[in-house]
Amino acid sequence: MNPKITSRIHQIGIHTFECKIDHLKKYEFEYLRSVLYDRKNYLQSTKYTNVYITEPQKGIRIKLTKGRFHELIVIVNPWILLHGTPDYSKIMISFEQQEFENALDSALRYYFGNNYGLERFRLSRADCTCDIYLSENVTREYIDLIRRSNKSRQKRICYSGDVKLYDPFFYKIGDPDFYTFSAYDKIYDLINRMHLPENPGHGLLRLELAFGNREICELRKNIASDKITDLIEFYLHNARCLIDKYVKDHFDPGDYYSYNSAEQIIEKEITIKKVRKKVKEYLCKADVSYDYDEYIAGISAITDTYEIKRTIKRNLSRLKINPVTIRTGYQYLPGLCTILDNASEQDSLSLSSIG
């Protein structure tokens, strides 16, 4: 076991969001490109996209795209926008709506002119974010476990933006039109982008649930508003519930163990020899699987009987063992469901003590 490894929720809120203007007229596109170039905000370009950066304390990146439709896309880091400090590890956990609306509107008009205020833009993406503090840097272990235990059946899968790439620091799955789920090593990301001078010695696992255009369209109908600040307020206030629901829907409960550690618990706690054998076979398949689909295929090779699978899962749930095992030198790590449940319990205790 690794009793000294602890984990806790560090912060939950909104990391970034994206707003855009669709179907720019050609003269508008040329005007915006000229304005941004004159301001010397130019960064890079591809055949169809020009990317611009602004001053670090503004918290804004800009994309001008040209293709079938011309678009102006603005990616906003709301914490930096409101505080004027380029701390890329912070996320927005609360805000005063009018102050936020004024700050965003002012920034847009500053870069694009008075004809491009907030009212012309629509929200096209919102990233609900949960940072998990780890007392040791075991983030890569978690990303491997998440990749192998995510039960999502979405067809469009991305690892570092490309299905063929494997990145030990980053995992992503989903359809950007609806939502994507990401898990990555935030400390590695900060060091890699030169926003952090040295490794602090602990881990920071970032979970991100990014809602895309179609999900946001549904939300507009449900709350009867298309104001960007109203939509951001919804995602901010519901970030914890949305992330919690995704994790509970897509990950089995229980903590992560190495196969040897789980085997010891099974030998001690399951008295029926036949059941014990099946549970260990089940864990063996998880231990050698690359991802969840391969794991399910391996389980089907053991048995296709629903009753046996139910018995196996019931025993693992009773013992609080996640079916997916740790494949590095660590013997035990808290599961995602456990971390979120512990955070909810702490919140309940804090509220009761206040009351």
Image: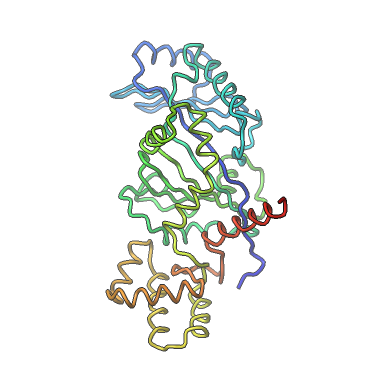
Number of marks in picture = 0
For the point 57% across and 29% down, the residue is: 59
Q: Nearer the viewer, residue 175 or 313?
A: 313
Colouring chosen for the image of the structure: rainbow
The answer to whether residue 296 is left or right of residue 355 is left
For the point 59% across and 55% down, the residue is: 344
User: Residue 351's x, y, as percent?
Assistant: 67, 51
Residue extending farthest to the front is 355
User: Residue 2's x, y, as percent?
Assistant: 62, 70
Q: Is residue 346 above or below residue 304?
A: above
The answer to whether residue 269 is left or right of residue 312 is right
The answer to whether residue 227 is left or right of residue 162 is right
Q: Is residue 36 above or below residue 217?
A: above
Q: Is residue 11 above or below residue 316?
A: above
Q: Nearer the viewer, residue 233 or 131?
A: 233
Quadrant assignment for the N terminus: bottom right
User: Residue 147's x, y, as percent?
Assistant: 43, 57
The answer to whether residue 232 is left or right of residue 49 is right
Q: Is residue 117 above or below residue 217?
A: above
**Rendering quarter of residue 49:** top left
Residue extending farthest to the right is 354
User: Residue 262's x, y, as percent?
Assistant: 50, 76
Q: Nearer the viewer, residue 348 or 309?
A: 348
